[in-house]
Image (spheres, rainbow, N blue to C red):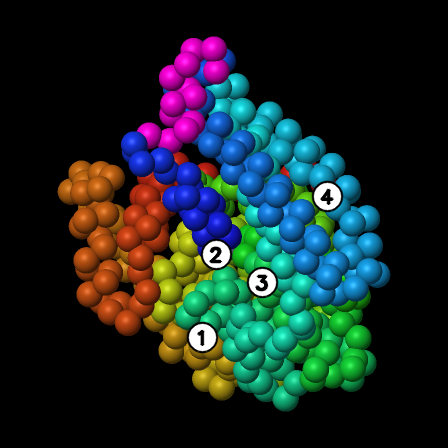
Amino acid sequence: MHLLLPLLLLEAAAQPATGRTPEEIACDNPADSDGRPFNLCVEETRFNRIQAELDAQLKLTLASVEERKGSAVAEALRNSQQAWVNRRESECQAFAATMPVTQSGRSYASCQARMTEVRIAELKLAAQPVSASPLPFTLKEIGPGVYAAIDGPERKALSNAGFVIGDDGVLVIDSLFTPEAAQALVAEIRRITPKPIKYAVNTHYHADHTGGDQVLRDAGAIIIAHKNVRGWVRTNNINLFGDRLTWELKARVESLPLPDVTTDKDLTIWLGSRKAVVSTVLGHTGGDLVVSVPDAKVLFTGDMLWRKVAPNLIDGSVEEWSATAADFVSGADAPQTRYVPGHGDVADAKDVEEFRAYLLELRRLVGEGQKAALKDDALVQHVAPKMRARFADWAISDRSIAAEVRYMNDELAGTKKRPVPEPD
Ligand SMILES: [Zn+2]
């Protein structure tokens, strides 16, 4: 992200002509290196230097906000500054405590530097005049008063969401990944209708669909989810990021709101005379809901459907999932139904069939590879080119196909790990 840029610039400026950084020179001296391995000493010292420069930048930014925005805004910022300093301290200490002891100094320092960068960016934003920035999604009216918010090619929203306007209120489906994207969604709803935002349904616990929940709750929504979501949203989401987990993501996941209303049965939500049906379905995580709006022939599927994008099978069961996908297109209304997938553009019944074919073909090819005793990379090499040839207009990254093959292999071998429901 753009936030890394200042770090890189600071680093470039610090390179001396000799090619050795001041940190490397300092860490040569055993008295300075404090018993730490050389490379950790260098990193920690580097982060401390960056931190000092960032703190100076932070002071300047605060001063510039005061100048541009007047004393009232500046005073509010100064008041929040001490709370922020305390929060930085406690969050970074907690983050460092989760790391191995040799890494904790480096983790603490890098956490402080990244938090300060974020704070500077926020302050700079506060100093700017309010301007209409482009939406992180494309809003599509796909039925009377039924809207799909579809993530764009820049993947700013990271998933899709939607909303339904009834006689006396609004029901939102999913909250996108970032609070900013959820704020944009709320702003679009407010632009279209003055009716209150009453409910938000989480289709499942994954953070790219629940990350903006607090914004929806602040806007007035009661958050409805499958009963397993309460036990998973703050914990299992950590696994979703794998090696891409940062302290920021971890902190965000751990502070996600827990749903207010949970169910393991179907529900009907009445928005005045308008009916929305929330149904429990099997396949993607073990805690999935879909929302249909019968009068508009729209089905919000969450991640039970991906349109021309390789699906994430991390928590999935292809066995259950392919059966649910078949159900989606078995009703009499299917040919006229518009499906809002979790990822990819608004879909029709043909897209659902294609998605199901994708799952079944993946299973067939992985099974074929297993019979030929192929493992790991060799198995991926057996499956990936064939999937890409058959689903030529799909976005199938190397990372996703490798993960899909691994998860499919585990499912067929009977070793697939899926999230376990918490006891009631
Ligand atoms: Zn998901």
SS state under label 3: loop
Instruction: Tell which residue pokes out farthest to the bottom in this image.
Output: 144
Image point 45% across, 58% down: which residue?
Answer: 321
Q: Which residue is mark 1?
A: 345
Point out the tag, 3 or 2, that comes first from the N-terminus: 2
- What's the CA distance linking mark 2 and mark 1? 27 Å
Q: Which residue is mark 2?
A: 2
29 versus 319 height, above or below: above
Point out the tag, 2 or 4, that comes first from the N-terminus: 2
Measured as percent of width and height from the top left, residue 246 is found at: 52, 41
- What's the CA distance linking mark 1 and mark 3? 15 Å
Q: Which residue is mark 3?
A: 176
Are the residues at dot 1 and dot 3 in contact (C-beta closer than 8 Å)?
A: no
- What's the CA distance linking mark 3 and mark 2? 21 Å
Image point 19% across, 58% down: which residue?
Answer: 385
Point out the tag, 1 or 3, that comes first from the N-terminus: 3
Image point 75% across, 59% down: which residue?
Answer: 66
Near mark 3 (Cα within 10 A), the count class, few <14, some 14-19 or many ≥20, is many
Query: Looking at numbered disc 3 in the image, what kind of residue is underneath it?
Result: Leu
- What's the CA distance linking mark 4 and mark 1? 39 Å
Q: Assess whether residue 26 is covered by the magenta stretch.
A: yes
Start and end of the magenta stretch? 20-32
Split into 4 quadrants, where in the image is the C terminus?
top right
Measured as percent of width and height from the top left, residue 107 is found at: 53, 30
Give the dominant element type of the magenta stretch: helix, strand or loop: helix
